[in-house]
Image: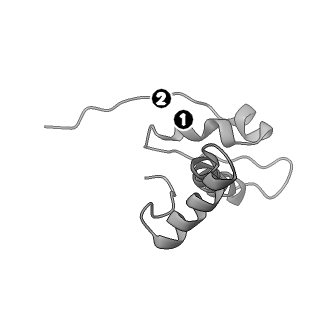
Amino acid sequence: GLPYLPYKDPLVVAQKRYYNRKGGKLGEKWYMQKAALWIMQTFGRGIRHKDDWTKVYFLDNRITRLKAFFIGWVKRATNWKLQTWKPRK
């Protein structure tokens, strides 16, 4: 799964409510940005030098919902091939 904060956690609910009061759906945006940040940090764990590279596989198609929150180099470096697998019988 993706690293979303616990949706019903009282602190998460309070933080989302705070941002929503500031305008529109800022609470939902904050919630999505947190997950996107943790994913970008995952990419960085395998990259320590300019010539390093890494592969990270996400087996959850909800990752596409977070694409808009990724910074430029992450968007450019990411291969967004989505596949579905059928369960074995």
Mark identifier at residue 84: none
Name the secondary structure under disc 1.
Answer: helix
Residue closer to the observer: 41 or 31? 31
Q: Quadrant of the C terminus?
A: top left
Q: Position of residue 60 (x, y in %)?
A: 43, 43
Judge depth for marks 2 and 1 and give the one in front: 1
> In the rendered picture of this protein, how many numbered marks are placed on residues?
2
Residue situated in front as seen by the camera: 11 or 21: 21
Q: Nearer the viewer, residue 1 or 4?
A: 4
**Cα distance, mark 2 to mark 1?**
9 Å
Say which residue label 1 marks.
Answer: 64
Q: Look at 57% across and 58% down and name the residue there.
A: 16
61 vs 39, left or right, is left
Kindly indicate whether the residue at mark 1 contacts the one at mark 2 (C-beta within 8 angstroms). Answer: yes
- Expressed as whole percent of the image width and height from the top left, the position of residue 86 reads 26, 32
Q: Nearer the viewer, residue 73 or 69?
A: 69
In percent of the image, x 43 and y 43: which residue is there? 59
Instruction: Provide residue 88's location: percent of width, then percent of height.
Output: 19, 38
Q: Is residue 38 left or right of residue 47?
A: left
Lower position in the chain sequence, tag 2 or tag 1: 1
- Give the vertical position of 23 relative to 87 (above or below): below
Q: Quadrant of residue 65?
A: top right
Q: Secondary structure at mark 2?
A: loop
For label 1, the crowd category at 10 Å Cα-Cα, with few meaning under 14, some 14 to 19 and many 20 or more, is few
Residue displayed at 83% across by 47% down: 51
Q: Amino acid at mark 1?
A: Thr
Q: Kindly identify which residue carries mark 2.
A: 82
Residue projecting furthest to the right: 50
Instruction: Give x and y (percent) for residue 73.
Output: 79, 39
